[in-house]
Amino acid sequence: MRLIRLCKMAKVLRMMRTFRFFSELRLMMDCVLGSFANALWCVVFIFFVMFVFSLLIVQSLTDYLQQNVSDGELTIDTGDIMRYYGTVRRCVLTLFQSTTAGMDWQDSFVILQESTTFGSVTFLLFICLFTISVWNIVTSTFVEQALKLAQPDLDTLVLEKRMKDMSEAKSLLEMFSSTERQNERSINHDEFLRMTRDNHFRSCMAARGIDIKDVEAFFRMLASANDGDSVDLKMLADACVRMKGVATSIDLQSLGFETRVMGHKQEHSIK
C-alpha cells in the first residue's frame, strides 16, 4: 500500500510540473529536495564546531573542579555547572541553545565567568565565531545551492520563450488592428507603409527590438507568400516577432536554400 501511495504521489508531482500555476511551488520543492545533502553536511559542520568548543570548555571546568573542590574554594554551585556543562553532550546542547535563541547565552556565560577564565574566553570566542562566520558560511552555501537549482530547465525555457512570443504577437496584432480598421483581418501595401511612417509605431517596434530595414521588401515577401496584394494581420504579427534579434547561421542557410530553390523554379519556367 505504501508503494502504491508513493507512486500516486509521484504521479501528482509530475502533473503539477506541467501546470504553470505551480511553477513557484515546484521551484521551492526542487530547492528543498536538491539542498538536502547540502543541509546534511552543514549540520555535520555545525556539530563539529560545537563539539570542539565543548571539549575545550568541559576540560577547563574539569580542571577548575579538580583544583577547588578539595580546597573548598568553589565560587559557584556545582549543580549549575553540571546542568549546563556536566558532559560534552550537555555542553553541545548549551552552545546550540545559546546560538539559536533557545536560551539567553548570558545565563550560561555567568557560570564560566565565575569559574574559569579560559572557559569564559572560549565561550565568547565561540559566540563571535559562530555568529559572524559559521552562520554566514552556512547561509551562503544554501543560497548558492538554491541559485543553482533555481536555474530553469530546457522545458521551462522553451515554454517561457513560446509564451513570450505569443504575448508579443498578440500585442502586435492589437497594434496593427487600429480603431478604424478593427473589423479587417488583412492590411495592404499602402496601409502598411503609412503605418510604418508613424513615429509612435516605429518607437513601439524599436522598444520590442524589431527593426525592419527595408519595409518594401519585407511586405512584398509576405504578400508573395500570401498570394495577393494584402497580408493577413496574424501572419504579419508572427513575421515581426521572428524579425527580432540577429540572423543566425541556420537562418542564413535557410535563406540560401530558398534562394536556390527559387532559382531552379525560374529556370524550369523559362525552359
Image (cartoon, helix red, strand yellow):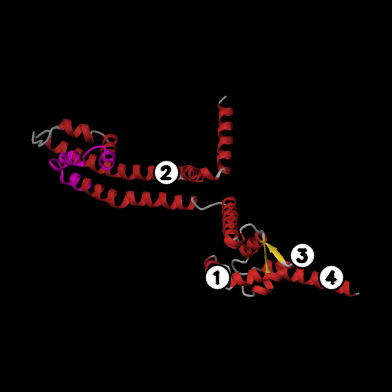
Q: Nearer the viewer, mark 4 or mark 3?
A: 3
Q: Nearer the viewer, mark 3 or mark 2?
A: 3
Element class at badge 2? helix
Where residue 129 appears, as percent x and y from the top left, is 27, 51
Which quarter of the rendered picture does the N terminus lie within?
Answer: top right
- 2 or 1: tag closer to the N-terminus: 2
Where residue 214 appears, as percent x and y from the top left, is 64, 75
> What residue is at 36 percent from the left and 52 percent from the top?
137
Q: Residue furthest right?
A: 271
- Res 115 → quadrant: top left
- 4 or 1: tag closer to the N-terminus: 1
Q: Nearer the viewer, mark 4 or mark 1?
A: 1
**Residue in front for this viewpoint, 264 or 130:** 264
Query: Magenta region: which residues?
Result: 95-122
Element class at badge 4? helix
| Residue 178 appears in the picture as rendered | no
Q: Residue furthest front?
A: 180
Marks 4/1: CA distance? 36 Å
- 4 or 3: tag closer to the N-terminus: 3
Determine which residue is flagged by label 4: 265
Three-letter code for the amino acid on which mark 1 is drawn: Arg
Q: Are marks 3 and 2 in contact (CB under 8 Å)?
A: no
On screen, residue 37 versus residue 49, left or right, reads right
Using the image, tell me which numbered label, if any, was put on residue 39.
2
**Residue in front for this viewpoint, 139 or 167:** 167
Where residue 195 appears, as percent x and y from the top left, is 60, 69
Q: Are marks 2 and 1 in contact (CB under 8 Å)?
A: no
> What residue is at 59 percent from the left and 62 percent from the top?
180
Determine which residue is flagged by label 1: 202
Determine which residue is flagged by label 3: 227
Q: Is residue 269 above or below residue 12?
A: below
